[in-house]
Image (cartoon, rainbow, N blue to C red):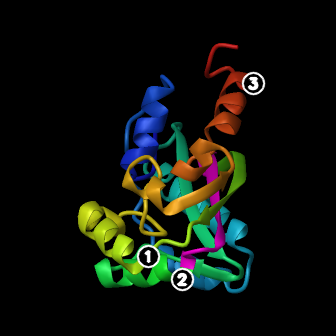
């Protein structure tokens, strides 16, 4: 069971042959972030993933539930999904020409017990693009810029924003897939 509305996470798990159902968890993400206070961004991602998995698992006794979330940090500044195109523009201008980190966390829960969790980090460097390019990108990407933290999807037009990416592709998409698959093989849910 996947406790996420993310089409990207569903696609990643589906492409890997993982049978899944979706039961999005309804949590107050900003509340979890506020409670985390000054915790590092990777810890915040882990807290969000746990909260999602635990919330969904409470309604699904006996089921294995995957909660996942991602934070974007530029130094100590934590970014959230932009509310609109104007906020997306402001975020992209802050990220332009700089390296930021994506922290992707997951938590597996069964019967309110966390059975596995991990967090992986990728570092992405945006190129020094012009304001004209930024305007064109925002117009072409449309409402998708508000669908993910950072206002981009590297699997689409967002890749044009970058000059360098260091990290696992699945981590960038918001789900540390290889650690999840390794755990599922060890515990017998997938063929070894």
The label on residue 173 is: none
The label on residue 130 is: 1
Of callouts 3 and 1, which one flags the residue occurring earlier in the amino acid sequence?
Answer: 1
Query: 11 or 191: nearer the eye?
Result: 11
Query: 68 or 85: nearer the eye?
Result: 85
Tell me the magenta residue range.
Answer: 95-112
The label on residue 94 is: 2
Where is 37 relative to 12, above or below?
below
From the top left corner, tell me how far across and down residue 161 is, in percent: 48, 62
Q: Decide whether the magenta segment is chiefly helix, strand or loop.
A: strand
Mark 2 vs mark 1: in front: 1
From the top left corner, tell me how far across and down residue 184 is, in percent: 66, 28
- For the question of whether residue 23 can be seen, the reply is no
Mark 2 vs mark 3: in front: 2
Residue at the spot x=52%, y=81% of the render?
31
Q: Residues within 10 Å of mark 3 (few under 14, many from 20)?
A: few
Of callouts 2 and 1, which one flags the residue occurring earlier in the amino acid sequence?
Answer: 2
Residue at the spot x=48%, y=22% of the render?
17
Inter-mark Cα distance, 3 to 1 = 48 Å
Mark 3 vs mark 1: in front: 1
Q: Is residue 141 left or right of residue 152?
A: left
Kind of element beneath mark 3:
helix
Query: 147 or 61: nearer the eye?
Result: 147
Residue 110: say if magenta: yes
Q: What residue sits right under mark 3 in the picture?
A: 186
- For the question of whether residue 170 can be seen, the reply is yes
Quadrant into which the C terminus falls: top right
Where is 22 relative to 48, above or below?
above
């Amino acid at each position: 069971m996947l406790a996420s509305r993310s089409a990207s996470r569903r696609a990643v798990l589906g492409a890997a042959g993982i049978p899944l159902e979706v039961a999005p968890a309804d949590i107050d993400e900003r509340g979890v972030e506020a409670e985390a206070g000054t915790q590092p961004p990777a810890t915040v991602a882990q807290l969000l993933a746990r909260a999602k998995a635990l919330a969904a698992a409470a309604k699904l006794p006996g089921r294995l539930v995957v909660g996942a979330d991602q934070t974007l940090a530029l130094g100590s500044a934590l970014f959230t999904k932009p509310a609109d195109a104007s906020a997306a523009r402001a975020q992209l201008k802050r990220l332009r020409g700089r390296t930021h980190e994506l922290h992707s966390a997951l938590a597996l829960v069964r019967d309110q017990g966390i059975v596995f969790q991990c967090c992986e980090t990728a570092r992405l460097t945006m190129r020094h693009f012009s304001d004209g390019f930024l305007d064109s990108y925002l117009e072409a990407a449309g409402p998708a810029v508000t669908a993910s933290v950072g206002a981009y999807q590297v699997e689409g037009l967002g890749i044009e924003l970058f000059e360098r990416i260091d990290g696992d592709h699945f981590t960038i998409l918001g789900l540390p897939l290889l650690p999840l698959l390794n755990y599922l093989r060890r515990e017998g849910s997938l063929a070894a």
